[in-house]
Image (cartoon, grey):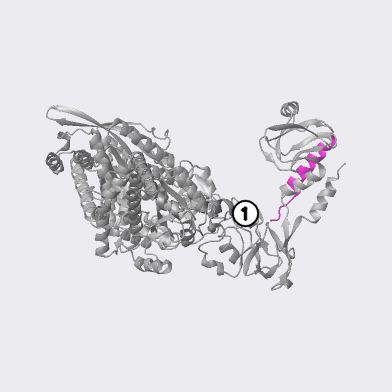
Amino acid sequence: MDNNIEKRLQGLRDRLTYLLDIFPGKHKDSATLLEEKLSAYTAHANSGEPDNLYRELANLEDLFAYVESRLEDEVTPMDRVRIVRHPQHICLRDILENVYDNFTEVGGQDEHSLDPSMLIARAVVTRRRGKKIYTQSVMVIGQEKGHGAEFRNGGSVKPWGNAKALQYMSVAETEGIPIHCYIFTPGSYPIEDYPGAAQQIARNIYHMAGLRVPVVAVISEGGSGGAEAINLADKRLMFSHGYYSVISPEGAAAIEGNLKAGRRATPELIESCAQNLKITAADNLKFGYIDRIVPEPPLGARPWHYDFCRSLRQEILRATDEVVISTRSMPLFRGLTLSRHRNPEANLDNLHIRWGLSTAAKKRLVERRQQKFLRFSRQAAHDKRPFLTKQAAAFYDWFSKPWVSFKYDFYRKHQRQIKTLMEEINNEWEMLKNRLLAPWHSLTRKLPGRVDSKARELTALSTWTDDGRRRKWNYISPRYKIDRAITCPNSASYGCPDLWGPDLFAEFAGVCSHCGYHFPMEPEWYVKNIFDKGSTFEFNNEIEAGNPLDFPYFSERIAKAQEKTGAKSGCMTFEARIDNIKMVVAMLMGTFRGGSVGAAEGYKFVEAASRAQKNRMPFLSYVHGTAGIRIQEGTHGLIQMPRCTVAVRRYIESGGLYMVLYDTNSFAGPVASFLGCSPYQFAVRSSNIGFAGPGVIRETTGTNIPPKYHRSYRALSRGHIQAIWDRRQIRANLKQALLTIGGRNLYYR
Amino acid sequence: MINISKILDEIKSSPYNEIVVCTPHTGRVTFTDIKTGDRVLGPQGLWNDNPGTHLATLEREHNFKPVCAPDKGEISLVHKELEGWFVEAGTPLVVLRHMLTRDEVQRMILQKALHLFRAPERAKYYFTPEADKKIRASETRSMAVRDGMELFIMSRMKREVPLHYSGPDGVIYEIYFKYNDNLECGAPLIGVCPPDHISVIQDMVARVQTEWTEKN
């Protein structure tokens, strides 16, 4: 047997192994057929005629191709997960070698890298127009899981790997070259060491929301937060066998099956979760979260599928060109060029477009990207506002815009001149009035019974006008009726005496009077005790959490949560005042399905941010508790990470003050996006802040974490938050922060 | 001269520590399903974060508080007669026998045989440069100390004061502290013994290591 045959046979053996791996226990007849044919050929190969051998081998390869294409129709979502995770599946280095013309790895090299799972390279593409050849540069950023799998950590990027990606995004922005992101990650590595998994992803998303260069993302394995770290792109392509999901099917099955640590979910449950989460490319295209699907060969692309690399090159060039063209200002010219580039027959290697952008085009690019993300997932939330209410709100928006614009854009700019003018007019008027009324005053001054108020003010005792709130609470937790003593969890270390329930939950505000341990309190406690009495005004409460994926039995669970809490979603948005300082508050309530964030919560958050922006108010995100993104909403939930971060970025850039206050448990997606991106994050002493809980960390990293790993003091030491507040001092601290960070009258720059 | 055999025999005659588990405060006692002879575990886990075996529940003002085993051992006595009774704080509930390990026995004997010089307050401790040089250069257990000798530097809050050794003359047999570590008040710094006792003590340590059988 010559080497060529041996090499091709090895290829077939690999294909058979691949097929057996991605269909465990399924399609046994096909696998057995291929196995028999392959072993028969191998046995025969040592003795047969060379001509016949080549012909038979070609037949055998055709048989493999036929079986693969037949099985392609029966690929389930979970099979797709196995395909993208398979070591034989194509990975980033294969793409760099076969899609781009040349490249230099810049963010480290192989295992000698800050984080080998994050691969960064400067690549070039050569294109021609007529006889002229053009070379264009791009920054390629993506997770790598192969080509040294032993140090790649399965494509699970550590926080510093994401920081490195962010650094090179800034480099690309400075150089004005497009960024191509390739997503091959099962999820981020959940450790809290600085810069912290959640906080770094939040920084990446926030930065990408305003990147002034074209960004194109290609998703193969899009696992939750790890994927979002480099996924906020102008165009998002997806491999036809890829998946893009809020959680791995195994993770979803563990939650759905309510499994304790160490127990494994059944394959059937995992399969059904993969099905129900709607994670495939076709599903995501239907939802509108990706722009295009890049077709892969049957059963997924592998490094030897050179045709696939060619088509991927065409698609990625097309996507980058489209982004650049869509920023052009002349609509007719733009439309013509776009249609030429969108033509599937066009060879993009022969069409050249400059990728550099003018300052105005960069602005348009960022605006288009932000608007694109803000439009996402609106259909997934139930907006039950009556038609007339919606119209009235829209009309009010339209009507109030000129007034707000006059007030803040004109009046505030010329405030000093206008005030001086008005004061002078007023002085003149007062002088005139006094002269006119002088005869009348001289008569009335002599009348009996007139009390000189000035004299009384100077001689009478002053009254104590301290804030009444310090003496009693506006709202007392219903748990104050509890008829028992309660042990402080710190009693073993600090020797706290038992606390009498009614005292603890009423007067002590749920705080241990000995060590200061904070027992969790209800969201209502904060709403009614932090803000001025009667000053809260809730809006958009008709937007309801739903079940956009029709996840089995989930509608009932949502209805139950709504009945239990009396709220329609896990996010309550309201306007409120603290000592007459107005603000907009978005509160994530830990009592509503753990405070998880879905499409409705994201919708309300975005609306609240835009309301704060329009009315020039400070925006406070009060996190009573959040368990992460609502997994039963799949990508509808996941997309809230970039979407809400875009809203926050637009708000901050328009001059607003955005503050976050954490309480109880705040984890995962929201912390890794629209909460973690805030420059001012504070926590109440009761809070735990992190990316993944202890159970998930144990499952994914295989290491145990020490007790109190996520406590707020640890988060403060790691630099994730700015300060820790006592619950009883939230009101005073919040006011202090508003005054010092925002200024007395300046919450808006 | 210390009599090793006598000390070892004393420990062998009662090869355990008796731990009396008492009520932390008043309350009504309910025992779990425990009986004399049961083996119980102390706090478990890498950080001792999982409490030991649940022995009883103490209820006061509808607050049920578990009473757990503080260490590994065998139950030698359960005060079952207190079941359902309202008891005072400090009432013994369970007596545990914690079988001594080899290291524990060795530590006990060394404490009896050596003179321990203890930290007078919470601080970091260092040897004086001369003493440090001698300890590093010479063989172990040859550094002689005498009463009133300036041996340590006590460092706290950028304040460094010399500390004089007080106690019987002898050589340093054991050093119990590390540089740059904060020591609590009363923690042993060094163990001192007369030079002619060294061989006896070494013999004793060897005997403990070979003869003592761990029962748990």
Spot occupied by residue A602 in the image (x, y as percentages of width and height): 34, 55
Spot occupied by residue A99 in the image (x, y as percentages of width and height): 25, 37
Residue type at tag 1: Cys
Using residue B201 as the reference point, say whether residue A676 is left or right of it: left
- Which residue is at a point 54% across and 55% down the rendered structure image? A465
Q: Nearer the viewer, residue A82 or A96?
A: A96
Point out the residue furthest to the right here.
B1
**Circle 1 chain:** A
Where is A710 relative to A421, above or below? Answer: below
Using residue B137 as the reference point, say whether residue A261 is left or right of it: left
Task: Give the quadrant of the N terminus of chain A.
Answer: top left
Chain part drawn in magenta: B195-216
Using residue A582 as the reference point, say whether residue A458 is left or right of it: right
- Which residue is at a point 63% across and 59% down the rendered structure image? B52
> Which residue lies under the disc numbered 1?
A515
- Which residue is at a point 75% across and 49% down the rendered structure image? B105
Q: Nearer the viewer, residue A232 or A345?
A: A232
User: Is residue B153 covered in magenta?
Assistant: no
| Circle 1 SS class | loop
Whether residue A552 is visible, yes or no, is yes
Q: Nearer the viewer, residue A348 or A546?
A: A546
